[in-house]
Image (spheres, rainbow, N blue to C red):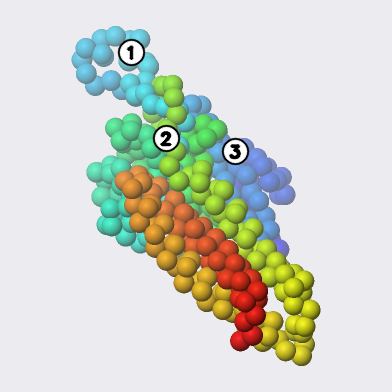
């Protein structure tokens, strides 16, 4: 299977071998790394260190302009990395904002604000400075070309743009060149931001959600084997071949009752999660929390009720 046209064009730009998976591309005096991953989860990623391409911004005030030392340095400071995550704005983003769950920084650029979702905890004034005219235009162009995510100053201090699907609204021919041009424009437009100490606060549910999902998935995978092991241990008369309903009736009762408990728990979890609204990532963490609680209670409740039914001699 041949590689996508965008990858072939990028290799040509970087004078890379036909089978290269990682290579360098230089466009408009901006050099960046391109990584291509083939197979069923194929993707193309552009990557360059933020501080390698960021440029000092112009000081507009006369007092500062007279001081060359200040003029050459950054005028913005923030906790680094800023982790400004950009993605195409979906209906789910709009609905979450309309419901007051998510709060997003607005740049004042109608096209950008309508089509791009900004997820970050960095201060609004710094984010608006970082998202200058060229950066906003380049991000919109990358998304038009089929890229699904852009991150500015990520965890490793990188600027990345990722395309995980090679279906585009534009013709494939010239897409690689256009994408490289847009990424170079984005990189050239980034301003220097001085680092401050500290770190941005994580969402209060972030740590809980990781453990909750692991626990919920373990219970989900273990519930059925645990039930059948228990039935085989305490009800030797149960025969799945001769009387399957005798064996499965408690499980079915547990599934139904567990689903009710899981739905109720998910509703209560959503009420609890409301106290953590007002961030750009609130809806994402809230959805994971509600799903994790609902799945865990459903599976654990179903198993407990099914075992109780077996012990009570429920035959169906």
Q: CA distance from mark 2 to mark 1?
A: 30 Å
Mark 3 lies on a secondary structure that is: strand
Pointer 1 local density, CA inside 10 Å: few below 14, some 14–19, many at least 20: some
Mark 2 lies on a secondary structure that is: loop
Mark 2 vs 3: CB contact within 8 A: no
Considering only order in the chain, which callout, 3 or 2, is on the residue closer to the N terminus? 3
Res 119 visible: yes
Residue sitting at x 48%, y 26%: 51
**Residue 55 versus residue 126: which sits nearer the camera?**
126
Circle nearer the viewer, 2 or 1: 2
In the figure, is residue 225 to the left or right of 306? right
Residue 143: assigned label: none
**Residue 14 versus residue 242: which sits nearer the camera?**
242
Q: Position of residue 259 (x, y in %)?
A: 50, 71
Considering only order in the chain, which callout, 1 or 3, is on the residue closer to the N terminus? 3
Residue that label 2 marks: 201
Q: Position of residue 260 (x, y in %)?
A: 46, 72
Q: Quadrant of residue 129?
A: top left
Residue that label 3 marks: 33
Pointer 3 local density, CA inside 10 Å: few below 14, some 14–19, many at least 20: some
Q: CA distance from mark 3 to mark 1?
A: 32 Å
Q: Quadrant of residue 82?
A: top left
Count of marks overlaid on the render: 3
Residue sitting at x 52%, y 70%: 258
Residue that label 1 marks: 70
Q: Position of residue 79 (x, y in %)?
A: 42, 27
Considering only order in the chain, which callout, 1 or 2, is on the residue closer to the N terminus? 1
Pointer 2 local density, CA inside 10 Å: few below 14, some 14–19, many at least 20: few
In the figure, is residue 21 to the left or right of 200? right
- Of the 4 image quadrants, the one containing the C terminus is bottom right
Circle nearer the viewer, 2 or 3: 2
């Amino acid at each position: 299977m041949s590689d996508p046209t965008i990858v072939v064009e990028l290799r040509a730009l970087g004078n890379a071998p036909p089978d290269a998976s990682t290579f360098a591309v230089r466009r408009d005096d901006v050099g960046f790394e391109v990584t291509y991953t083939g197979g069923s989860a194929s993707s193309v990623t552009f990557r360059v260190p933020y501080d390698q391409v960021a440029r000092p911004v112009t000081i507009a005030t006369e007092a500062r302009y007279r001081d060359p030392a200040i003029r050459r340095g950054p005028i913005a400071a923030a906790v680094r990395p800023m982790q400004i995550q950009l993605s195409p704005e979906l209906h789910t983003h709009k609905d979450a904002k309309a419901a007051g769950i998510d709060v997003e920084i607005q740049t004042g650029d109608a096209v950008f604000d309508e089509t791009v979702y900004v997820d970050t905890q960095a201060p609004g004034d710094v984010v608006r400075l970082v998202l200058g005219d060229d950066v906003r235009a380049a991000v919109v162009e990358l998304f038009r070309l089929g890229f699904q995510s852009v991150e500015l100053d990520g965890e490793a201090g990188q600027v990345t743009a990722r395309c995980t699907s090679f279906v585009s609204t534009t013709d494939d021919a010239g897409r690689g060149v256009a994408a490289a041009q847009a990424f170079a424009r984005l990189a050239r437009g980034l301003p220097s931001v001085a680092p401050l100490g500290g770190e941005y606060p994580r969402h209060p549910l972030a740590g809980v959600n990781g453990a909750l999902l692991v626990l919920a998935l373990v219970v989900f995978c273990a519930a059925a084997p645990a039930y059948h092991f228990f039935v085989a241990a305490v009800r030797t008369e149960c025969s799945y071949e001769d009387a399957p309903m005798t064996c499965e009736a408690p499980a079915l009762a547990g599934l139904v009752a567990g689903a009710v408990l899981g739905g109720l728990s998910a509703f209560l979890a959503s009420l609890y999660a409301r106290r953590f609204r007002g961030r750009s990532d609130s809806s994402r963490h809230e959805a994971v929390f509600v799903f994790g609680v609902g799945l865990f209670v459903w599976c654990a409740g179903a198993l407990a009720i099914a075992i109780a039914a077996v012990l009570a001699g429920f035959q169906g």
